[in-house]
Amino acid sequence: MQWCEVINKPIAALQVALFGFSMTVSLQVVGADMPGRGMRHAQVTDWCTPLSVRLPKISQNDCRNSALVPTGASSFNGFPILEKNFAADPQRKHPLKILLLGGIHGDEQTASAVVFKWLAMMHKTGTQEFQWKVAPIVNPDGLLAVRPKRVNARGIDLNRNFPTPNWQQDAPRYWAKVTRSDPRRYPGKAPISEPESRWVYDTIENYKPDVIISVHAPFGVLDLDGPVTPPKRFGRLWYNRVGVYPGSLGNYSGLHKDIPVVTIELPNATQMPSDAEVLRIWQDMQGWIRRNVPAPPKLAQRN
């Protein structure tokens, strides 16, 4: 049973199965005890308690110190999609705009946890070279399922749900013939049918990033879709093409929208890299952006 189906009080118990153990954490919600109002329509106010249970090497304090705020969009089960925005140094006239995403697949816990580590570095650094919009957990329902799962609460792979050209023909055909109808890669019945993929789509349209960094696991490589020179390596991760799929973010943004998408595939979905490796990936990523992503045009031309 999903956690959202059992909570009907302002403070309730969340049963979490993690690495073979079961534990109970409290979840603060607002409005769940109102007549006729289910959890999917409630406002979650304590997100760090359940998230820290699932994210390796991320404590509740780490989560709170990240200063994430709700975007206004929520998952299908009502969990807020969270973000943190960092302005660039005001002396930089037209800084690059970066969209950093983690946790599109809920069973890739390190993909979210490493973004929290980078958020801590950004808070510590203060002044930023680039302008950032950071969303570490795009698929909270997948992460917080009884057992973390790739898909969202409706069983849809968010990374096959973006509106690539000919999606209606290509995505279902690819799913049926190539994946043999693998339920972990079900693209859904229509593109951007899910609140989570819709939020990413709307953010790309409104924020207009110059580059997107999307963190996954566990292939242990780098991938790039889009019109820039690919990175050779970030830390111990070397560039190695993963592939292009109907409905994927890389296909939609990198090939269709011409907004470069770097996919960072960490080596393990549940075990974090060392702190030194997390730092190296972060530094190498920024160095690659600095050298290879074209400077944006003047603000008047962008608008």
Image: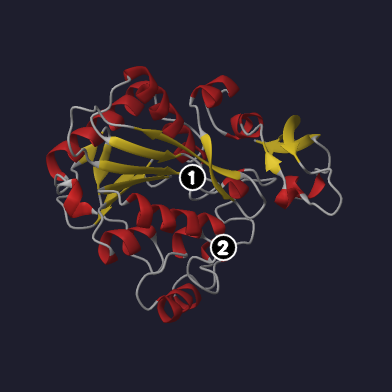
Considering the numbered disc 2 on the image, is that residue within a helix, a strand or a loop? loop
Q: Position of residue 85 (x, y in %)?
A: 40, 35
The answer to whether residue 224 is above or below residue 275 is below
The answer to whether residue 8 is above or below residue 153 is above
- Residue furthest out toward the bottom: 169
- Give the mark, 1 or 2, whose residue is nearer the N terminus: 1
Q: What's the mark number on residue 119?
A: none
Residue type, label 2: Ile
Q: Position of residue 81 (x, y in %)?
A: 54, 45
Q: What's the mark number on residue 156?
A: 2
User: In the rendered image, which quarter is residue 281 located in?
Assistant: top left
- In space, the residues marked 1 and 2 are separated at their CA atoms by 14 Å
**Side of 13 relative to 139 (left or right):** right
Q: Residues within 10 Å of mark 2 (few under 14, many from 20)?
A: many
Q: Nearer the viewer, residue 295 or 275?
A: 295
**Side of 266 relative to 187 (left or right):** left
User: Which residue is found at the position 37% from the left and 17% from the top?
Assistant: 124
**Side of 70 relative to 8 (left or right):** left
Q: Residues within 10 Å of mark 1 (few under 14, many from 20)?
A: many
Report the residue marked by disc 1.
103
CB under 8 Å between discs 1 and 2: no
Q: Position of residue 291 (x, y in %)?
A: 12, 39
User: Which residue is found at the position 23% from the left and 29% from the top?
Assistant: 129
Task: Say if residue 195 shows up in the picture.
Answer: yes
Quadrant of the rendering where the C terminus is positioned:
bottom left
